[in-house]
Image (cartoon, coloured by chain):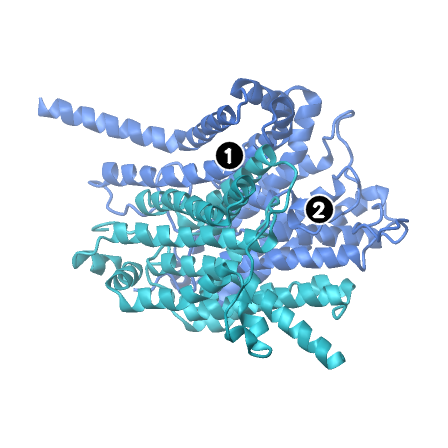
Chain colours: A cyan, B blue
Amino acid sequence: MSHFFTYTILTATVATALGLAAPFLLAALGETVGQRSGVINLGVDGIMLLSAFGTYFTALRTGNLLYAILAGMGVGAVMGVVTAFISVTLKAEQGISGIGIYLFGLGFSDLLFIKYVGTPLPISTLNPINIPILDRIPAVGGMLFKQTILVYVAFLLVPVVTFLLNRTTFGMKIRAAGENPAAADSVGVNVKRIRWEAVLIGCVLAGLAGAALLMFDGIFQENLTQSEGFIAVALVYFGAWRPTGVMGGSLLYGLAIAVVLEWKSLGIIPLSASDLWATAPAVITILALLTVARRFRQPAALGKPYERGG
Amino acid sequence: MSRVSAALANAWQDRRRFILSWFALPMSLVVALLLGAVMMLALGANPITGYNALIVGAFDGSYALGATAVQAAPLLLVAVGICVAFRANMFNIGGEGQLAMGGVASAATALALPNLPSIVLIPVVLLAGAAGGAVWGAIPGAFKAYLNVNEILSTIMLNLVAVQIVNWLLAGPMVDKTQNSTYGLIPETRLLPKASWLPILIANTQLHLGVLIAVFVAVGVWVLLYKTSFGFRIQAVGLSRDASKYAGMPVKRTMTLAMTISGAMCGIGGALLVFGSISHRMVTDGSLTGFTGSDGFNGIVVALFGALNPIWSIISAFLFGGLIVGGDALQVATGVPADMVTALEGLVVVFVVSLEYMRRRSRATSLAPQNKSKDLPQGPATTVPAAAPFVGAQEPNEP
């Protein structure tokens, strides 16, 4: 009996971890694309908040989850235009302008929520999709193959982004813009345009991340993300600007949160100490920044606006 | 003829530069407020009623002014802390965590020393707050200086750690066990000793001693930054680590110290939040903003709007303190949620940094013949210094 119990707990924990990891992964993959082109977007958290609200509101009004997710991505795209305009066209200091975008998103999403929704109502969220045959695999099936569509999409995007960055001309231009924009410019790469596109991709993915987070929680509230967007930025460093590394970091983060969440409610971790356990992901990230991430080199032009002839 | 047009063009350049230098900051606030008016119109509220309510709520009468000053005090301390870090070319966005650690350290000290007289206890708890914040600033500072860890990321992570530590302390070791509740204990401390309460300076207002302390600290930090050799060192390190190292300055120690001071300022701010609170307890709702009211982030806005100068930040803090206090009045009068103020603050930040580029470019073009080094900050430091604060995991000065 107790054996069966442990088995169920483990399956549930890993399954939850994947669901929790998906928003981190989506946002961090988007941020990876942007950072490889040389643009740091610190406003991810604000964008996630706005898109989560967009998703929530659309789902509440139309009841159509596809429209809701598209709305979240649309909000991400709009914020992407704003972010790209500020960081690429106006060449503003990216670390600070991102905080501005964050504060705007934090305030504006809650403003809209209070004004147009007021009392929080849960929405019906995505149903898990069982992958035929694979979901029958003992243990693994229950852990990996009974997730919602957004979780599958998030993990499928890992090879897609890897391919995009490493095997396509577009990806090469992105990396060139992030490593040596002057050299890229001299061989005819439009650095400004490439960075615009990379930032837009990143923000649309941040929008999708907001939608995924909302779908996981099923309800909107003030500051829904609780700094998840910032963590996603840290995960890019954690993953050394590589999609697979970012995935590893997201999984670790998702697992750490899931363990606290599931085991606390089961009484495995004493309630009094659960707050301290909850620091684990952040502490792990700091340790990772101290050790692993320092061994890898960041894109050389990261955070530096490109000025022709400058 | 061409001479005249050249002179005219020159005059226009000069004027443009002058406007951008001195009006960039006020303009960014005005434009943000105008966008706020558009938002209110879109939400079906009258912007004139709204802003009128905001101004009356924030600045009309001694009670409102007192409330604004009390709101401004922790903001000012956070902003001053950010100024110090920024001068050393570091961006401290760990204000939230440093406020919380300062608050919890000061509360613990006050609870441990219940029998001291006010005149001793208040300085002691403020110092305890400073120490709590200093530790939380020293960690990312040392990581940055010695291990080259991006301080933006480490401070954000430490914010997340701080909130859980505070939650744990207030629900466990520091919880008020005397409360009788059937639904479990509220995570809050006992009533703090009366001697530790910050005395009210003017009767019938909330104006407490903390406001004076904050202003005093801001002036002190201005002196430290601009009138001492240590301050000079901080600025030298901020402008060029290589040059400072070459000049024999202890670069890494200076960076760590700058972040430590930065954290200490925020820590004092946290102590003010605890001892200037109406309930005279430290309470948590499980999130950081419950205790800090986002002051750690709002302080960034204050510092930027204060041109990253501690003295200007005094005015800036009062202004933004007023916006926050008046935001509630705005909500009552028009039904537009007070969160609008947070959104407007975000816009101010975006405008300030965007205008900074235009300012730098207009300088670069108009000064180009005489002075090629357009990256050095010149003239009045009205906005963000030209030196980029965001430096990643690498040394920024590699060839």
Chain bearing tag 2 is: B
Crowding at mark 2 (Cα within 10 Å: few <14, some 14-19, many 20+): many
The residue most toward the front is: A132
Look at the image and tell me in which quarter the N terminus of chain B lies. top left
Q: CA distance from mark 2 to mark 1?
A: 27 Å
Q: Residue at x 31, y 52 (%)?
A: A197
Residue type (three-letter) at the residue carrying disc 2: Ala
In the displayed structure, B312 sits above or below B335; it is below
In the picture, measured across the screen, residue B209 lies left or right of residue A174, that is right
The residue most toward the left is: B1
The residue carrying mark 2 is B271
Q: Is residue B253 visible?
A: no
Residue type (three-letter) at the residue carrying disc 1: Leu
In the picture, measured across the screen, residue A268 lies left or right of residue B39, that is right
Q: Which mark is residue B344?
A: 1
In the displayed structure, B55 sits above or below B96; it is above
Q: Residue at x 59, y 63 (%)?
A: A282
In the displayed structure, B48 sits above or below A269; it is above
In the picture, measured across the screen, residue A12 lies left or right of residue B51, that is right
